[in-house]
Image (tube, rainbow, N blue to C red):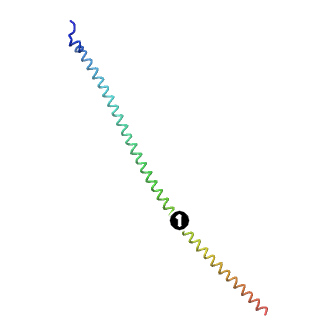
Amino acid sequence: MPPSDIESEHGGDESDHETNSKMQKLLDVYKNKFAQLRNAYNEVEREKDHIKNILQQHQDTSIKRQTELREKIKLERQTKEQNETLYRKEISLRDNKIEELTQQLTVQNDRAQVDQEEIRNLREK
């Protein structure tokens, strides 16, 4: 007996069952692939967030270190300037003392010379 129009359109009961079974298997395959893809994407996102956190920590550490080094350089520069000022004052004081002692020595040498001349003059008399 020839198939009816309805049976020929749908292909029969067994054909629908096979098609449904194939579609269900394909659906399971695609669901599995989608789940794998979703898991891989989530893993990539976790890694990205982890790397982002590490980068932020390193940047924070670097910025903190740069700030500390700038402050250290500033303090060292101030200390150097203070030391230079103190050394210049000390050198100036010592130069003044040397000048004073040189003048005293000159005066004493002049007095000694005058005294020696007076002694010679007294001996000659």
Number of numbered tags placed on the structure image: 1
Q: Where, by quadrant of the figure, is residue 15 drawn? A: top left
> Which quadrant: the N terminus?
top left
Against 14, is 37 above or below? Answer: below
> Which quadrant: the C terminus?
bottom right
- 24 vs 85, left or right, is left
Amino acid tagged 1: Glu
According to the picture, the residue beneath numbered tag 1 turns out to be 81
**At which x and y percent is residue 11?**
24, 14
Q: Which residue is depicted at the point 49% across and 60% down?
A: 74
Q: Nearer the viewer, residue 10 or 115?
A: 10
Mark 1: few/some/many CA within 10 Å (<14, 14-19, 20+): few
Q: Which residue is depicted at the point 63% across and 76% down?
A: 99
Secondary structure of the residue carrying tag 1 is: helix
- 34 vs 83, left or right, is left
Residue at the limit of the structure toward the bottom, as seen here:
125
Residue at the limit of the structure toward the top, as seen here:
1
- 24 vs 41, left or right, is left
Against 3, is 43 above or below? Answer: below
**At which x and y percent is residue 10?**
23, 15
**At which x and y percent is residue 6?**
20, 13
Against 124, is 77 above or below? Answer: above
Q: Which residue is depicted at the point 46% across and 54% down?
A: 66
Q: Which residue is depicted at the point 23% across and 12% down?
A: 8
